[in-house]
Image (cartoon, rainbow, N blue to C red):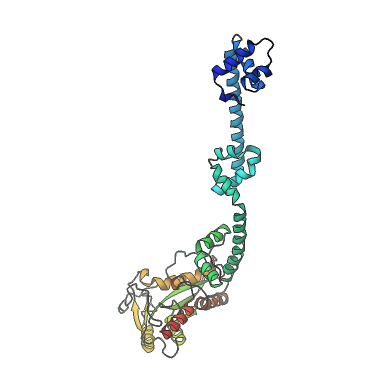
């Protein structure tokens, strides 16, 4: 039995009974009292020590010294734990799961209670985390398998796809996955898509141009294909201070790159060739009745361009001078093309390499590249689905 059950008065009476029993042994007296004989022995010993002169003061000092030594030892242990923790985390975020892992690794040396107290963790939380080890291992294996598929999709997109497009690709392959999980796995393994950078303005305005109304007024949407188009020119750096130039024609309904043209000059034929290519891609009807919107670059305000638009039955539209937001969709397309083809490089090695890169990208953009504004499907797929739905209706 422990001594905490007995009052001081009971202990004192027990000691007095032992002392007042001639020839009495610890065992016999303890048996009469219903206690353990070793317990009685301790009480008698403590009473004898307390009765010695100065024993109480010396005992108090010794007790205090023991407490101080215990505290010093505890502080040394805490210091050692914190030292190991600093080395263990090594600059990583000290997430709760990481700290639980630290406790698990060192609990044999320091004990769970002490470690949780120093790291301000819940012991019950630690044991719940410990119980979920098998589940975490399963998730880790699943994440590793998912990461392999993500890396494959990322490589097939030439490193351009971010989490939204990767998620769409996975779902089309029958993988049920949340985009947040895809983003987490990509982030953990350093898989990233390319992001837009600030665009260098290349438009050369023509102050003397005949005014043309803005028929879009920044409404870059269309309810049918082949009704609204936007276009722009961008430069293609090929080294040695030289450039090629790309003109594009984009359908605002499906975001399809209907036509484009590449040349080593910025004459009007660059943009008229792109417009004619779009008309050819649209078949017999061409672009007749459609609106083509551009900025106020010299090529788009020329008489030659106006004549080609008239021949093709295209209504011209232009934004305000010096306002890039009035042609933002076309500029965004060109910025995306250069970002995804150059992938951080400053230039192509030559004109042929640049032409092939743009051709490959433009073709894949229309047929395979997923577009966030189209529900993560390609422009041509979007047009085909729309046609199917319209026919069915």
Q: Between 92 and 42, which is closer to the camera in this rendering?
A: 42
Q: Is residue 360 above or below residue 52?
A: below
Describe residue 380's horizontal placement relative to residue 112 as left or right. Answer: left
Q: Is residue 159 above or below residue 278?
A: above
Query: Which of the 4 image quarters holds residue 190?
Result: bottom right
Percent of width and height locating residue 174: 56, 71
Q: Between 183 and 109, which is closer to the camera in this rendering?
A: 109
Residue for point 49% across, 74% down: 377
Asked if residue 265 can be seen in this view, the reply is no
Q: Give the tally of numbered discs.
A: 0
Percent of width and height locating residue 80: 62, 36
Quadrant placement of the C terminus: bottom left
Describe residue 390's horizontal placement relative to residue 146 as left or right. Answer: left
Quadrant placement of the N terminus: top right
Residue for point 63% across, 37% down: 110
User: Which residue is situated farthest in the bottom direction here?
Assistant: 284
Percent of width and height locating residue 238: 54, 72
Query: Which of the 4 image quarters holds residue 187?
Result: bottom right
Describe residue 267's horizontal placement relative to residue 60 as left or right. Answer: left
Asked if residue 179 can be seen in this view, the reply is yes
Q: Between 368 and 13, which is closer to the camera in this rendering?
A: 13
Residue for point 61% across, 34% down: 77
Q: Between 359 and 4, which is closer to the camera in this rendering?
A: 4
Percent of width and height locating residue 42: 64, 19
């Amino acid at each position: 039995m422990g001594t905490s059950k007995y009052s001081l008065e009971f202990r004192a009476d027990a000691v007095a009974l032992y002392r007042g029993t001639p020839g009495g042994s610890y065992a016999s007296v303890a048996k009469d009292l219903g206690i353990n004989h070793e317990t009685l022995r301790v009480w008698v010993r403590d009473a004898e020590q307390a009765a010695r002169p100065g024993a109480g003061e010396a005992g108090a000092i010794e007790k205090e010294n023991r407490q101080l030594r215990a505290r010093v030892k505890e502080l040394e242990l805490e210091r050692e734990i914190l030292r190991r923790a600093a080395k263990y985390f090594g600059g990583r975020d000290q997430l709760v799961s990481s700290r639980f892992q630290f406790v698990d690794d060192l609990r044999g040396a320091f004990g769970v209670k002490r470690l949780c107290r120093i790291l301000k963790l819940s012991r019950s939380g630690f044991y719940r985390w410990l119980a979920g080890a098998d589940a975490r291992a399963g998730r880790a294996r699943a994440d590793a398998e998912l990461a392999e598929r993500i890396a494959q999709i990322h490589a097939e997109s030439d490193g351009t796809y971010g989490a939204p497009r990767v998620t769409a690709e996975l779902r089309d392959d029958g993988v049920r996955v949340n985009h947040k999980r895809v983003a987490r796995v990509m982030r953990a393994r350093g898989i990233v898509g390319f992001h837009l950078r600030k665009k260098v303005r290349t438009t050369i305005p023509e102050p003397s141009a005949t005014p043309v109304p803005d028929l879009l007024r920044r409404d870059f949407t269309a309810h049918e294909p082949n009704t609204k188009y936007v276009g722009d020119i961008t430069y293609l750096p090929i080294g040695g201070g030289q450039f090629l130039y790309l003109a594009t024609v984009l359908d605002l309904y499906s975001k399809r790159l209907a036509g484009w043209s590449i040349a080593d000059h910025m004459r009007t034929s660059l943009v008229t060739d792109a417009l004619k290519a779009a008309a050819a891609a649209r078949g017999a009807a061409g672009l007749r009745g459609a609106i083509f919107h551009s900025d106020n670059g010299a090529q788009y305000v020329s008489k030659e361009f106006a004549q080609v638009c008239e021949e093709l039955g295209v209504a011209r539209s232009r934004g305000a001078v010096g306002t890039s937001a009035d042609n933002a969709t076309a500029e965004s397309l060109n910025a995306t093309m250069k970002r995804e083809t150059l992938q951080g490089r400053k230039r192509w090695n030559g004109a042929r390499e640049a032409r092939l890169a743009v051709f490959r990208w433009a073709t894949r953009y229309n047929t395979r590249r997923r577009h966030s504004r189209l529900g993560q499907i390609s422009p041509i797929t979007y047009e085909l689905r729309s046609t199917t739905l319209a026919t069915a209706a």
